[in-house]
Image: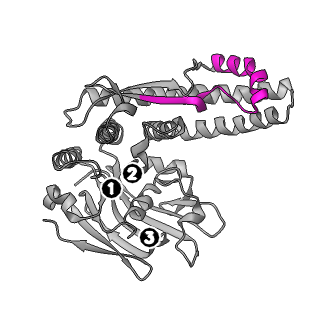
Amino acid sequence: MTSLCVRALVLSHFRSHRLARLAFDGRPIAIYGANGSGKTNLLEAVSLLSPGRGLRRAGSDELARRPERLGWKIRAEIRTPSRTHEIETWAEPGSSRQVRIDGKAATQVSLAACLRVLWLVPAMDRLWIEPAEGRRRFLDRITLSFVPDHAEASLTYEKAMRDRNRLLRDQINDQVWFNGLESQMAQAGAQIMANRRLALARLMAAQDNADSAFPQADLALTTSDSTELPESEAGLAEAFAAGRRRDMAAGRTLLGPHRADLTAIFAAKSMPAAQCSTGEQKALLISLILANARALIADLDGPPILLLDEVAAHLDADRRAALYAEVLALGAQAFMTGTGPELFAELGSSAQVLEVLEESGGSAILERSSR
């Protein structure tokens, strides 16, 4: 039994699930079914028990079951090492997402005090060859798992930058206004960079100390255009002020934490991740998610919850078995999806097994026996 787990999950008018009631015992959960049956919707619901927009980054209105569009609700019972929490999150049509913890209204950031959730989804398979924005988002999600306040620093920075960009586009050369916004950006930006550095250090240490079948990645924080990025508050403030003329010509801020990039080297081959095979790129991603989970164990008195969507894609039978063995060794409650039960055969009775079926324009969930 894991020390941190979802014990019960209830979905109401969420995506393809009109009403679903599920109970879990802390073991990993293997979820199989045809494409489009609603497997990933279950993982997305669990991802929304953490701060942010979930693993699909969907807006609240996108989550409501069609055609009713009555709004949606997720209710969960979470067990932590110290207590049990009741979490509810929902949205009415046209309104923003709401959160309640143990019967009291709460912010999304408060969810991080109850549980941490890490995920790997097929859209991330192109992480190493897509534009830098996806890698920044990946790094910031990892950083948020270590530093929940990272979200507030990011929001502060982005709001001030939007206001600065508006001045730039409107060609308003108000030094006092620029100084105030750039001061906010520099303070929040320095915190963002420090948080990211801490996250990378934690990941690298967790990889160094691991006995893992998955490859180690040498990670570095760079910029998307290879320019030098100041990381101190004073350095950022000076760079913003010095770049006003150039930024005004471009109509946007051209330097700052929003231009950072994450690079990875397949350590055993000294090869950039972007040049690795599809299977190697997937293995590197899995390695980082497992390292993230290992690093969090000390913070949480147990592993975080893992969401591994279509995790068997690009993995042969031996690599799948290695992944499941590491998940079990972590003691993590992992929600894993695939198209057929044979993909989870190596787990045997160590996992709960659910089949998701498309039924009457929605999804039905059946519990199957482990083998």
Q: Residue 299 vs residue 100: left or right?
A: left
Report the span colored magenta: 234-263
**Residue 336 pos. (x, y %):** 30, 57
Of marks 2 and 1, which one's residue comes earlier in the chain?
2
Q: Position of residue 213 (x, y in %)?
A: 20, 37
Q: Badge 3: how crowded within 10 Å, few (<14), some, or many (20+)?
A: many
The reply to whether discs 3 and 1 touch (Cβ–Cβ < 8 Å) is no
Observer-side mark, 3 or 1, equals 1
Which callout, 2 or 3, points at the residue further toward the start of the chain? 3
Alpha carbon distance from label 2 to label 3: 23 Å
Along the line of sight, which residue is nearer the eye, 86 or 190?
A: 190
Q: What secondary structure is marked by label 3?
A: strand
Q: Is residue 239 magenta?
A: yes
Does the residue at mark 2 contact the one at mark 1 (Cβ under 8 Å)? Answer: yes
Amino acid type of the residue tagged 3 in the rendering: Leu
Please report whichever mark, 3 or 1, sits nearer to the chain's N-terminal start.
3
- Quadrant where the N terminus sits is bottom left
Q: Residue at x 27, y 49 (%)?
A: 332
State the separation of the CA atoms marked 2 and 1: 7 Å
Q: Amino acid at mark 2?
A: Pro
Tell me, for residue 299, which label it has, or none: none
Q: Amino acid at mark 1?
A: Glu
- Magenta segment's dominant SS is helix
Q: Give how far apart the Cα atoms at labels 3 and 1 are.
A: 21 Å
The structure residue drawn at horizontal position 53% and vertical position 53%, both measured from the top left corner, is 57
State the residue position of label 3: 11
